[in-house]
Amino acid sequence: MTDYIQAWQCVGCGKIEAPQTCIGVCRDRKILMVGKDEHDSVVDQSARLRDALQCAIAMLNRVVRSTPRDGQWERCYRALQEQARETIAKLEAAST
């Protein structure tokens, strides 16, 4: 579970005060902050998911752009199946 730290950020200068607002010179708004380790973990996970999405898009593009020659549809279909299996294995390996 994510632990948030409540703080106040000035709408003018951007300074951050916690655990309470400053003496009242600035106009503050409440913000929520997370720890660096948690943030880095989410950024890493997001990068892995972006890579997996690009891999899946590349595979789908191969399917969309393939046009088998006359009498070669089954060979093309089997090759695309094999590429799809390899892509799925790669995505599953990256998700662990």
Image: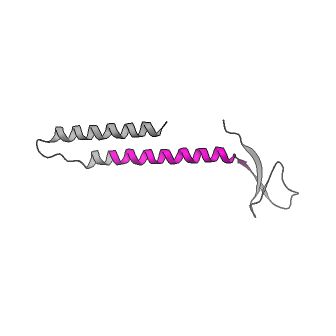
Horizontally, is 50 left or right of 55 in the view? right
Residue at the image position 39 percent from the left and 46 percent from the top: 55
Q: How is the image coloured?
A: one colour
Q: Is residue 15 above or below residue 86?
A: below
Where is residue 88? Give x, y as percent. 37, 37
Q: Residue furthest left?
A: 71
Quarter that holds the N terminus:
top right
Q: Residue furthest right?
A: 23
Picture quarter containing residue 26? bottom right
Rendered position, 69 above or below 9: above
At a point 61% along the width and 47% down the height, the residue shown is 40
Q: Is residue 63 left or right of residue 21?
A: left
Q: Residue lying at the far bottom in this picture: please name it.
A: 13
Dominant SS type (magenta): helix
- Position above or below: 50 against 74: below
Left or right: where does residue 10 sit relative to residue 73?
right
Q: Position of residue 71 (x, y in %)?
A: 11, 41
Closer to the camera in the image, 44 or 68:
44
Segment colored magenta: 31-59
Report the residue at 44% width, 37% height from top.
93
The residue lying toward the viewer, choosing from 31 and 65, is 65
- Compared across the picture, whether 71 is left or right of 9 comes to left
Q: Give x and y (percent) for residue 11.
A: 74, 60
Q: Is-magenta flag for residue 43?
A: yes
Q: Is residue 37 magenta?
A: yes
Total count of labels: 0
| Residue 65, position as x, y percentages in the image | 26, 50
Which residue is found at the position 23% from the left and 47% from the top? 66
